[in-house]
Amino acid sequence: MSADTHEIVSAFAQAGLDLHGTLREMLDEHPAHRTERRGCGYTQASRFLSTFINQPRRPDQSLDFGLFAEWPKARTEALARQAIAAGWARGWRRLDRCDPAMRAHLLPESLAAQLATLPKILADIEAGLQHEESRLLMTLIRQILAPEAPAAPSITEMSEKPEIGSCSRAEEFFLEIAHGRVRRNGRVNVFVDNACQPLLVEKLGLGESHSAMAVAPVTICDVVLPPGSLFALRYPDETKPKRDIACGHLLPIEAITQARFLRLTTLAVSTAIRRRAFSAQFEAQLRGDMLSPASTTIDDLRQFALDNLARG
């Protein structure tokens, strides 16, 4: 491994689990992934993970192992069917928590043992990472492969890719919204939980409509997405709001029929490491004269939502 190798790439290699070649290139900031529209390799890596995040964690399918360069997917699915037949409803997932006596009868034994140790390997990799942005991505990878019972509010996934894109300039509007600036003809909706706490801030008439940013953790397919995550939303046009607010509507999170995680934005990490994490994309935000990309935080956007809820 060279000095430029991303620490996630190195950590997985050291654990004997090489990541998919495309994901490695993205994390290592290959020039092909550092374009004006794509942003930077880190942005692209979160887009790569979105393909896996937006699909259900099925117990008998091995699609999630597409994160790795190599994995015996067919044998994993065969083993999963054995586990389900033996009474372990989660299939190949979380075999570390099933009855060891049952696991001992799964074949091949070596694969069953590898699957049982996978959650600990992932947790150890996560614990050994030094950088905030690495731990953020690694938490997503770990949840894809070894999901826990999520505590954050859950939204039904949008299985197909929507017309709403994940262009690297999406932050432009949310940075402005975070500072209380909503352009003419634009509207901003706030989705809240049962305690009327803001979860998602959605923009309409500002670039692509029905694009939203999380200001609190939300769950899709058992993966908890952090504040600063970008989503595409779908809900009926006739949805009745809880009430109007100054910039748009206050809506319950239950109104969302489908949501798709698109990528992490620069607001997902602290300002101190934003340049390191998002490199070329962050530099483009500065060159593009976006509103305070170096100092605006996701807390600013959340405060905007809270202020609008208070004003009504």
Image (cartoon, helix red, strand yellow):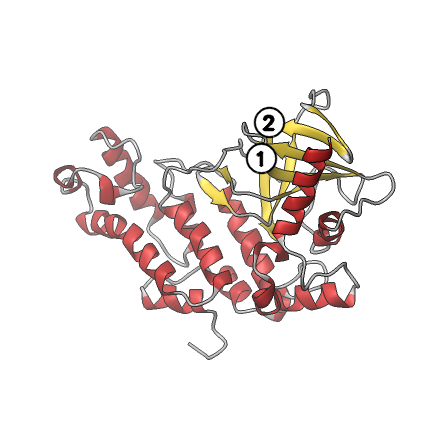
Tag 1: amino acid: Gln
Quadrant of the rendered image containing residue 198:
top right
Q: Is residue 160 visible?
A: no
**Could you give the CA–CA distance between mark 2 and mark 1, rounded to whole angstroms?**
19 Å
Closest to the observer, 160 or 43: 43
Q: Mark 2 or 1, which is nearer the eye? A: 1
Tag 2: amino acid: Thr
Q: Position of residue 1 (x, y in %)?
A: 42, 76
Q: Position of residue 62 (x, y in %)?
A: 38, 43
151 to the left or right of 163:
left
Residue topped by disc 2: 257
- Number of labels in the image equals 2
Above or below, comparing residue 130 to residue 185 in the picture: below
- Identify which residue is drawn at 67% across, 40% down: 305
Q: Position of residue 196 (x, y in %)?
A: 59, 30
What SS does tag 1 mark? loop
- Identify which residue is drawn at 69% across, 21% down: 239
287 to the left or right of 35:
right
How dense is the environment of label 2, judged by Cα within 10 Å: few (below 14), some, or many (20 and up)?
some
Residue topped by disc 1: 197
Q: Position of residue 289 (x, y in %)?
A: 79, 63
Which dot marks residue 67?
none
Closer to the chain start, of discs 2 and 1, is 1
Q: Is residue 142 visible?
A: yes
Closest to the observer, 258 or 289: 289
Hey, which residue is sitting farthest right in the picture? 184
- Identify which residue is drawn at 20% across, 47% down: 108
What SS does tag 2 mark? loop
Closest to the observer, 46 or 83: 46
35 to the left or right of 49:
right
Quadrant housing the C terminus = top right
How dense is the environment of label 1, judged by Cα within 10 Å: few (below 14), some, or many (20 and up)?
some
